[in-house]
Image (spheres, grey):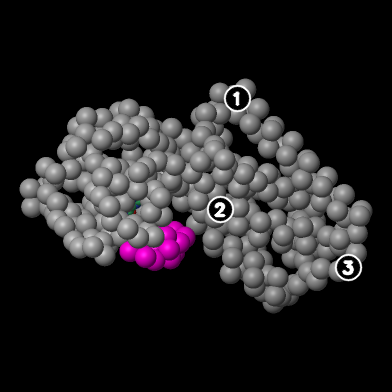
Amino acid sequence: MAGRRTNLALAVLLLLALVSGGLSFATGTAAARWPVLAHGVLGLAIVILAPWKAVIARRGLGRSRPGRWASVVLAILTGTAVVSGVLFSTGINLRYGPLNAMQVHVGSALATIPFAVHHLWRRPVRPQRFDVARRNLLRAGGLAGVAGVAWLGVEAASRLLRLPGRRRRFTGSHERGSHDPAAMPATQWFDDSPPDLDPDAWRLAVTAAAGASELAFADLDRGDEVTAVLDCTSGWWSEQTWAGTSVAHLLGDARGRSILVRSATGYARRFPMADAGRLLLATRIGGEPLSRRHGSPARLVAPGRRGFWWVKWVVEIEVDDRPWWWQAPFPLT
Ligand SMILES: Nc1nc2c(c(=O)[nH]1)N[C@H]1C(S)=C(S)[C@@H](COP(=O)(O)O)O[C@H]1N2
Ligand SMILES: [Mo]
């Protein structure tokens, strides 16, 4: 009975942790920070239930049932996701050889999915009507409360022990090299690699229903400037001053529903038309030309949006009538 309740709670927690984790990657403004908060509390709730689950698991491991190895893998992956999550948020450990803590965290969390599905299929926890009984809702509320207190405890401990995590941004990211472009990390979303583009030969294609135009590098040095935070989902943020040409200026009176910004590598993101005034096509960072790693000759600056929106090595800006959400929520390459 008690075991069934723990199992059901863990299944729900794992699902909510995956969903809130995905939503955290979309968090770009302080107003949209709740998934990040929820994600931390959900992770700690899993930790709190671990002792009860350990009792259940010990019982189960004693019997040799089919699919036992998959359950063990699920336990290891969940443990890895939770531990790397805590090590990342506190800043105790941010690197594991070639990987950073966020890669380990997201990788192990995503890898739980097939094993969790398999586990639930082999050992279903069937929700019953009395699961929503008052007593159990109180229990769930109690767990949420204890997890919330644990979350505050981790925050307090980070401050007390002066861990790097105490200065994290609302997205959970750690600061890196603000106003010092040379110290700012360069990252690719997935498997993209920096192309070598010659600014003199480089052309920007701007297309809209009304027609197309081509701009050269020199045309972009308008001196529009913005100081903005690039916040990468791999867990770092950096504030820099960028200069170039506002996208609204590039588009002139072009009309449409969305703006597609495409890289020389094929990487692309689509933005609502209303963003044009906020977007900057930057050719400079901290007054200096962009380096190749950071998107030379020109890269997008999208204040209030996570790093994966900041398309580098831009070669094309296109306005059309597709809705901006007509794309994968995250880049696929
Ligand atoms: N063409 C292209 N643009 C890209 C990426 C990419 O892989 N390809 N990565 C994005 C991601 S995930 C981030 S966080 C920022 C990183 O910018 P930086 O390398 O200048 O720090 O670039 C974005 N622009
Ligand atoms: Mo990123």
Mark found first going from the N terminus, 2 or 1 = 2
Image quadrant assignment for residue 32? top right
Q: Is residue 20 left or right of residue 199?
A: right
Residue denoted by label 2 = 23
- Using the numbered discs, state the Cα–Cα distance from disc 2 to disc 3 in whole angstroms: 30 Å
> Which amino acid type is shown beneath numbered disc 2?
Leu
**In magenta stretch: residue 324:** yes
Q: Position of residue 101 (x, y in %)?
A: 48, 45
Q: Residue at x 14, y 51 (%)?
A: 215
- How packed is label 1: few (under 14 Cα within 10 Å), some, or many (20 or more)? some
Q: Amino acid at mark 3?
A: Arg
- Write the residue at 86% across / 53% down: 137
In the depicted view, which residue is nearer to us: 272 or 49? 272
Look at discs 3 and 1 and give the one toward the viewer: 3
Residue 251 rendering spot, x and y as whole percentages: 26, 51
**Circle on res. 129:** 3
As helix, strand or loop, the secondary structure at mark 2 comes to helix
Which quadrant: the N terminus? bottom right
x, y percentage for residue 100?
Answer: 44, 45
The magenta-colored residue range is 320-333
Write down the residue under mark 1: 159
Residue 272 is one of the magenta-drawn residues: no
Q: Cβ(mark 2) to ligand 2 < 8 Å?
A: no
Give the overall secondary structure of the magenta segment: loop
- The residues bearing labels 2 and 1 have C-alpha atoms spaced at a distance of 26 Å
Query: Element at badge 3?
Result: helix
